[in-house]
Image: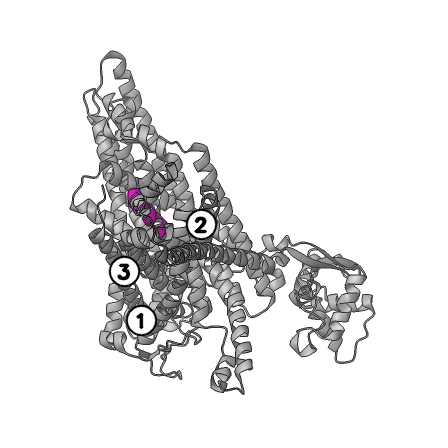
Amino acid sequence: MTDAALRAAGPAIPSFLKGAVEARLKARHAQERRFVLYGRMAIIIALAFLAVLLGRIGLQGYTTFVDYRVTVPVYIDPARVDRADIAGANFDMLVAQAVMKKLSIPDDDVGENVGKVMELMSNDLGFQLMAQVRANPSLIGRHVNVTGPMKADAALYFKGQIKRSTPPEGRKLDDAQLDWLDRMKASGAVVSGFNSGFFTRSDSTEPEQAGVLGAVVGSTMMLIVTALLAVPIGVMAAIYLEEFAPKNRWTDLVEVNINNLAAVPSIVYGLLGLAVFINWLGVPRSSPLVGGLVLALMALPTVIIATRSSLKAVPPSIREAALALGASKTQAVFHHVLPLALPGVMTGAILSMAHALGETAPLLMIGMISFVPGVPGGFTQAATVLPVQVFIWENASERAFHERTAGAIIVLLVFMILMNLAAIILRRRFERRW
Amino acid sequence: MLTWAALAALLLFSTYAFAQARRRLAATAQTRRIHSRPVHHGTYVTLWTLAPAALVLALVGAFGGKMESALLRADTPAIVRTLTPAQAEVFFDDAQALAHGGTPSQTAYAGELKEALTDKTAQAHNLEQTLQVGSIVLAAVLAVGGFLLAFRRLAPDFRARNRVEGWIGGLLTACSVVAILTTVGILASLVFESWRFFQVVSPLQFLFGTDWDPQIAMRSDQVATKGAFGAVPLFAGTFLVMLIAMAVAAPVGLFSAIYLSEYATSRTRSLVKPLLEILAGVPTVVYGFFAALTVGPLFRAFFNAVGAKLVGGPLDGIGVYLGQVQNQMALVAGAVMGVMLIPFVSSLSDDIINAVPQHLRDGSLALGATKSETIKKVVLPAALPGIAAAMLLAVSRAVGETMIVTMAAGLQAKTTINPLDTVTTVTVQIVTLLTGDQEFDSPKTLSAFGLGLTLFVVTLALNIIALRIVQKYREQYD
């Protein structure tokens, strides 16, 4: 009679309650399932946002890396280009007329069509031509081949972002211009290729001539300043607080203070930079130096916190062994503890630099928003940096700048991913578990 | 240029000093026992050679320009005194620019003024030379003197190592003081500039005024509004955007933290957590771009479509309103900011939930509670102070966030609770006030510092409250 014995072990549920108990149990299990579902949904929502964000930027930006280059044989008409005053000639018009001749587009008296063709060709072609003729005036009277980008709107048509199906009032190019573009493409004068100009040029008011080189160089210079200041100072401050500082009110104050600094909004650091570095100390505005100074102060708490946690992870036995062998406190820390903590310190430093690379708001305060057409010449010259370049282009009204913005974001994200990868590899490769 | 050469020479001399000291002690060590290793003696001598001289060069490098302009302005020629202060400033800047080979302003000087300029240019040139040569001579004296004094102290029994370690200790302490100095700098700059602002606009008017219109005339002939500095609309806008952001971030972040720490397998966790970290690592300007060019138009199209459906029906008024909704609205900025805060809330809550001891869960499960009941009735109450603190920190982040709102929220100062309206926030106004042409004495520019001070105080208070909550309500389990 084992069955009966087992049944007797638990209190039997009276039959009139059985239905209620089962219903309640069912409700509780349903509640459980709903709860798990909420959790799954939360994760899915977060990851979906990530996918949409990155996917959207990829879609908007990948066309930046393709450009359409046109090659035109231009006759340098001696009647139009004066040997004595080469810069006075209208080379843009020469280019446009060469295109018209090639496509046999007629022109009227007022030159309406020339103007329309000039709207399709980047003035970079004219600049190139002028530079060539200046360097070698004997070209006057001869045919010269120039290759350069199409104007941004023409490129947008080739990329399918300006569509023929939109009514002509809604697009920048009219039907005739679209026909010419089709014929230019069919004639083989226009070839598409990798947009190397995006990486070899700096900011420009013309979208097709704008690139990220100046911003990349500016960002690099600023990060150098930031790293040179924030990493040594942060690491040394962390060593002091973790290894040397006595436990007293002063060190408590420093500690609370560092935690608070880590939570101060970044824009406040910009105000600090404006008031102290620019107005009081006279550091040049919008230079990589002042940007680096501000970001160094901002990155300092992060570096300190990361260094402290990796110093904490080194077991006390290491310190004690060194001290027991007669090393001084300083020797124990610098010869034994710090080298063992170094991978963690470097990981923290790289991550905080990656964070500094993406920071925008404080840099707007210190004048980095100005238009800088070239590569910055030094640490005290005006410069622009990648995230600010993104902000500037986002504000531009031309549609072609939108894809450039997304392109610049892709470049920025690639740099950040590289830095994060470096940190991960460093951690995987050198981190020790005790 | 000359200063760099002097610095290079100094470094060279320090290397020489190091080598000399070390060789001398290494020779002594052959015959008898020495207290510190030769390298410590070398470092000791190098420190005394290098540090004071380098300090002088660095100070003159950093503050030389300021000293020069102060000395230059010390005696102002009579003719310059007749100019307005702004013109006099330009005059002195031009004198300095001419003296250092820079580009002066376009101002044309004539007659007596031109003579004064030439005079001052020469003076500026002289001052610069004097400062430079003086600092180099002083540095040279300090370097040689430091070297000789330190070198004379070297002896087998000299405790060079302890001295060097004293220097290192001092250096480490100085580095930790930088953090304090940063706070002092932030406070000083904000308070000082705000104080100047509050002399023009009373703090009460600033904090409780309901009209924000900082576009005041910079010159008397300019047509502009009188200017009003009541920040209530900005606080309202900031609050609205923060509320929307938290409405997105709090549930999604908290639930994903609960799922990750209580339900997910370790494989899911190791996959999802780095992905959430990517979301946290995306620069805010990227979120701003996404908000302005993707989410904004999307929301607008949605609301306009809904509005078109409602027009002519019983909800005609709402339909007409929805048809006019713009890209820039509080909802867009708030929603995108909420997404940005998800990983922040999630990782903080995750840590806190993991810190709740396992035996509490085991006890609850053993009494027959389901897993979700355990979480709701046991884990979350135990973690509540920590989660509340995490939410406050997220609020502080939302209040201080700049780029998303700058790019997606708008500039119109409105006191509204309508999420479809365009609002402006404290941070947006700081950016707007401080980019573009600025004159440092106008209340318009200074008001940015008043806003900055308010922002700093609010975020600091939030952080301190968060810290207090954690300290006060922390349960000691073991």
**Looking at the image, residue B299 lies above or below residue A60:** below
Residue A41 or residue A354, whichever sits in front: A41
Question: Which residue is more in the foreground, A103 or B59?
Answer: A103
Q: Earlier in the sequence, mark 2 or mark 3?
A: 2
Choose the circle earlier in sequence order: 1 or 2: 2
Q: Decide which of tag 1 and tag 3 comes sooner along the chain.
A: 1
| B256 sits left or right of A67 in the view | left
Left or right: where does residue A397 sit relative to residue A39?
Answer: right
SS at mark 2 in the image: helix
Disc 3 target residue: B462
The residue labelled by disc 2 is B277
Point 53% across, 49% down: residue:
A414
Q: Mark 2 Cα within 10 Å, few/some/many (few <14, many 20+)?
A: few
From the viewer's side, name the closer residue of A126 and B343. B343
Instruction: Identify the magenta region.
Output: B347-361
Q: Residue at coordinates 32% horizontally, 57% vertically from top-left?
A: B393
Disc ID at residue B447: 1
Residue displayed at 51% across by 53% down: A412
